Amino acid sequence: MVISDTHGNYLAPLACLDDEGGIDLIIHLGDEINDGRMLQNLTSIPVILVPGNCDHDAREPRELCGVLGGQRIFMTHGDIYRVKNGLDALARKAVSEKASVALFGHTHTPLVLEENGLLLVNPGTLMAASTHRSFAVLTVTTASASAEIFQAPPHP
């Protein structure tokens, strides 16, 4: 499960977990990384934390790249690569890291886009004030990666 921009609404990811069984890892891409820490404490699911531009006290690195499920995945909040102005810089960085998947947030707009062999995924936002709250489920195997956007349940 990939989430971003929860902005204090840690209850929304919990509700999404209830609706979406079989999640074995949560990736929180920042903007209220403490929500990700709450998920670590409230669930038995491992959580990867990547701080965003609103996570001023975070000690975790602002970007990560590693192999998950057989695919090399680049993870960032996205502000560093100015994703609100386009995805070229993000895509170049992911390719330079030899990643097949780039996960990012920041825009609050969900996106799944495959371009030149790179899967770009933005889960959207789970912020309480948003009328279009969403998250992504990323499925990876050694042979492929795919993602799907889901609307969050109406509660929390």
Image: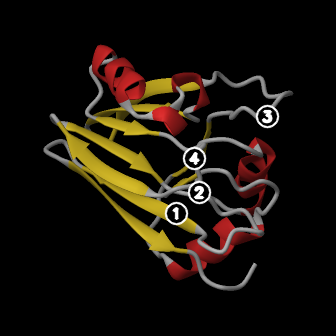
Q: Earlier in the sequence, mark 3 or mark 2?
A: 2
Q: Earlier in the sequence, mark 3 or mark 1?
A: 3
Q: Nearer the viewer, mark 2 or mark 4?
A: 4
63 lies left or right of 44: left
Res 69 visible: no
Name the residue that disc number 3 marks. 55
Q: Nearer the viewer, mark 1 or mark 4?
A: 4
Name the residue that disc number 2 marks. 45
73 w.r.t. 5: above or below: above
25 w.r.t. 13: above or below: above
Q: Amino acid at mark 1?
A: Phe
Which mark identifies residue 135?
Answer: 1
Q: Nearer the viewer, mark 3 or mark 2?
A: 3
104 lies left or right of 125: left
Asked if marks 3 and 1 touch (Cβ < 8 Å), the reply is no
Name the residue that disc number 4 marks. 107
Q: Position of residue 49 (x, y in %)?
A: 64, 38
Asked whether 77 or 65 is in front, the reply is 77
Q: Residues within 10 Å of mark 3 (few under 14, many from 20)?
A: some
Q: Earlier in the sequence, mark 1 or mark 4?
A: 4
- C-alpha distance separating marks 1 and 2: 16 Å
